Image: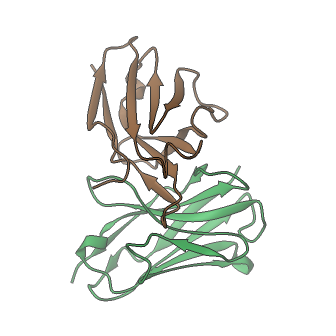
Chain colours: A green, B brown
Amino acid sequence: QLQLQESGSGLVKPSQTLSLTCAVSGGSSGSGAYSWSWIRQPPGKGLEWIGYIYHTGTTYYNPSLKSRVTISVDRSKNQFSLKLTSVTAADTAVYYCASSGRGNYYFDYWGQGTLVTVSS
Amino acid sequence: QSALTQPASVSGSPGQSITISCTGTSSDVGGYNYVSWYQQHLGKAPKLVICDVSNRPSGVSNRFSGSKSGNTASLTISGLQAEDEADYYCTSYTSSRNLWVFGGGTKLTVL
């Protein structure tokens, strides 16, 4: 069974870059068996899809965040990453990584989530 | 404002059935059979309970069922149990520049 674990800085200053990684176990981040997403949830609010990366490296991003987001896969470390630039307080949220099995249009496995607070 | 519309809250007594609706457009819910539902207990990660409109993943109780009519999808939970109290989110694949859109979430209270 696939397991996902987010890690990264829990506190980021305004205008700086948020960086998170998602470690994959029980499967390969570089195989064609899965694609990978980042999803976030501001405190007390709903879920927002951030972006998605195929095993080929092709990416899709939420248009509202596209200019600031980069998602990448590191096959050697069996993980994938999120970078969000020029953050503001509005980017404060719990960030989840999630997987989608090949050909699946849903998120079958989720990490536990990590809270990122944007504050000076 | 979320792309998919869900009621903010629903409630029911143990043993009863409840239904949560999720309304979108022909570009998402109505255009694809790719609606999924997630259960989120307080402080926990979301858990997939229904995929592809009406399919239950392995391990999910058969008290959970899904359906769709036009641009509206529904999640029904029968035989309500205290453990069902949680937030529920729908999501759909979309032909817009977003690949996925979420509903705003529905808080289920078991009375």
Query: In the image, is residue A72 above or below residue B101?
Result: below
Q: Position of residue A52 (x, y in %)?
A: 57, 68
Q: Would you say A57 lies left or right of B13 here?
A: right
A78 and B107: which is toward the camera: B107
Residue at screen point 38% across, 47% down: B4
As drawn, the residue found furthest toward the top would be: B15
Percent across and percent down for residue B28 are 49, 50
Q: Quadrant of residue B53?
A: top right
Q: Along the line of sight, which residue is nearer the eye, A6 or B50?
A: B50
* Relative horizontal placement of residue B98, taking residue A102 as reference (left or right): left
Image location (x, y in percent) of residue A45: 28, 53
Q: Please tell me which residue is depicted at 41% across the width and 27% down the height of the picture.
A: B84
Q: Name the residue at 64% across, 55% down.
A: A100
User: Looking at the image, how many numbered discs can be counted on the residues?
Assistant: 0
Q: Quadrant of the C terminus of chain A?
A: bottom left
Please say if A27 is above or below B77: below
In the image, A110 versus B11, the foreground residue is B11
